[in-house]
Amino acid sequence: MAVTGTDRTDGVPAAPDAAAGRAGSGTAARSLGPDGRRAPEIGLGRAVGILVRLRWALMVSGWRRSTATFVFSIIGVLYFGGLTLLASAAVVFAPAPESMALRAAVTTLFCAGLVLGWSLVAPFITGVDATLDPRSFQPYPIRRLPLVTGLLVGTLTTPQGVLTLVFALAVGVSWRDHPAALPWGLAGGVLTAATALALAYGVTAVLSSYTGQRRIRDIVSVLVFIPLMLGGVVLNRIVDSFDQLVALAEPVAAVLAWTPFGAAGAAAGAAASGAHLTAAVHLAVGLAWLAAAVALWAWGLQRTVEPVAEVGGRRRASSGDATARERPLRWIGRPATGPVTAIAARCQRYWFTDPRYSATLVVVPLFAVLLWFLGSRGDVGSGPLIPTMLLLGPMIAWTMGVAVSADIAYDHTAFHHHVTAGVRGADDRWGRVLGMGVLGVPATLLGAVGSVALYGMWDHLAVVLGASVGTLACVTGMASLLSARLVYAVPKPGDSPFATPQGAGMRTVVVQMASLLLSLLITLPITACVVAYLLLGMTALWGAVTLAVGLLWGGGVLLLGVRLGGRWLDRTAAETYQTVARF
Amino acid sequence: MRAENAPDPDFALVARALTKRFGDRLALQGLDLDVPAGSFFGVVGPNGAGKTTALSMATGLLRPDHGRAWIHGVDVWQRPREAKSRVGVLADGVRTFDRLSGAQLVTYAGLLHGLDADVVAARTADLLRVMDLADAGRKPVVDYSAGMTKKVLLAAAMVHAPDVLVLDEPFEAVDPVSAANIRDILHSYVERGGTVIVSSHVMDLVQRMCSHVAVIAEGRLVASGTVDEVRGGQDLEERFVELVGGRHAGEGLAWL
């Protein structure tokens, strides 16, 4: 009852009388939980005990039920345990930097990395372990803060929690040669581990509590991919040498030392240089951040179990007739009028709203950045070489074209709409091509023209355009043909675009290899023109030839691919449907 | 009632000797089915009996190993487009294009069938109104409840005014009020000459709602006819258990 209770205000860590409350063992939670006011409720201490035991009981019964689960758990613990121990040993026994300031910064950065990793990777990419779904405690008399605290402590006792704790403590132990700093380091380690887990669950709870949760998660799961892909390159650019990296460590750590990520970790370094008061402040700030993370979790939980009534209720009430009459299904702003435009409109919408499609779009600007870094590494002034950047157009074209081949697999069983409506294969193929084209054509043109404009090499415009548009058309045609029947496992609707699909196996590899080889083969005439252009003095004539061949050959391949793919789909729609349905 | 000449246009659906093998398991073993036009036809059977397999074959989703199926005399697998234009399908346990709004999804289904855009727009508005989804029309289907999703999929199955509606478990997760509304819609559809084929686990519902029923067990047709013929004075559920078997006699929970 109390979890959803309405007569309570303890969603925020305020309750001033609570500190005097009970001899609770929790660190932050004691000042948070105004527990014990009602007799039948489960207090903090008991809640923690119950939840920790429950957690383990569930884990052990999972092992008992399935030998495979047990074996995999063992392997997982051995693997990650081994990694953690290695990393911990490295942290503890590696020679510490001479400079005390640098050493302090490194400690802070390790802790910050741990917390940041947990709070990004767990909610957005892997998802958190939901063995104990807080919602299942709704019927029991336990308040949110004891519940959350219990869940947190319970998580700390699970293998991944223990490993997190081990590493965080190892970072603290690395101060073993400074007896004055060691206790601060250990306390900071415990705080860091707890904050990491609390923040991971807190962020997840808040995300899943939002009514627009799906859309937020969609956007974030795509955006989080950008730093992952670019991180290495950017770092490589910014930091030319190890010295620079070292120089960067201290100012970054100085900032992180006040954030939830590094506050607790910064205590040890401060103490080592004698500033015990600063160390205490850091630890207090860390404690406050932990409390905030727990409060965030509790708040997210409150929003989950007490869903706000206005889920979509803000809609204007009288939208009924108007909704349909204003032709809701639109392709490039115009109402769809038949199967082809309807499918194009639907695909267009998916390109913008489904993260599995949008992830492809994110990759496009990344190409530009990657090519720019690659290009600017070499000697720019060495001869009349074509800049690497000019490959941008063809690369975007290839990516967008190949994306069509995943289309039916992305539909999954929603493809049954096409099958039961008896959509003509060619209509299906054209619709998907046109839907992709809404973004594929502008992106390709933008890449081609933009890369030329960047260097002011307008002489090359024709050849770059020819290669880009030709590639887009050829690869799209090929994908339209192959994907009529050769579908491969992709993340299911609603899954993260980076989730590994189940049962992919060899089929995916074969289809993708075949796509790559085939696309090299079918773009051969265009490639030949480009080579001729490069070898024969880059004349305007060969540029024009490349453009013409790109348009004509590409157009031909596209037409043929769509037509043959359509015919193939006409014959085998049922089989294709059964194949995707099995994924 | 059985179609004498197999491709009989007076029958909404005729199936002959439908057979499907999945690996070692024979899902359907020569199933015959005759659904008279204008009937409200229930297909019942235990889990795994082959109901969904049979209906998938009749709607072009699964190619039979042997046997044929005709919709109003049109062979589903030889003239698929013509046959499919006369059938509306509500499949069970499948996804839909759930990032479209309800209105978009119904429009999409109508346009896929090649209807005129104006007709689709008018019918979409009507269908959403009848299904009590007018207000939810702008919301993406992914945010619908299970019952709302069923209703919008039913609307999508009806938008091209088919002669035959094939509905796999249409009432699952639908609230009683909506279910009653949907039953009204289906009954008036049948009164105007349409044929409804529903599969269901709920005997009570079939007995109240359907004019005809077929019982399938282990991939074969066990009984078929009007509901009164099949139940032979008994309750349909009792008769079903009698036909299908599988009841446990003997010790129950003595301690309870």
Image (spheres, grey):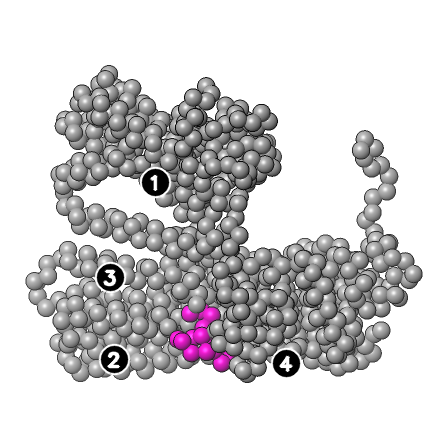
The tag on residue A104 is none
Q: Position of residue A388 (x, y in %)?
A: 19, 63
Q: Going 27% across and 73% down the picture, which residue do you hit?
A: A445
| Residue A71 drawn above or below residue A486 | above
Residue position for label 4: B82
Q: Which residue is mark 3?
A: A368
The residue segment tinted magenta is A330-348
Q: Quadrant of residue B224?
A: bottom right
- Pointer 1 and pointer 4: residues touching (CB < 8 Å)? no
Mark 1 → mark 2, Cα distance in angstroms: 48 Å
Query: On what subunit does the disc labeled 3 rest?
Result: A
Element type at mark 1: helix
Pointers 3 and 2 in contact (C-beta within 8 Å): no
**Residue in the image at 10% along x and 68% along y:** A384
- Residue situated in front as seen by the camera: A198 or A469: A198
Residues at marks 1 and 4 on the same chain: no
Graded by Cα atoms within 10 Å as few (under 14), some (14 to 19) or many (20 or more), the crowding at tag 4 reads: some
Please give the residue where the numbered disc 2 appears in the rendered image. A547
The percent position of residue A111, horizontal first and vertical second, equals 29, 33
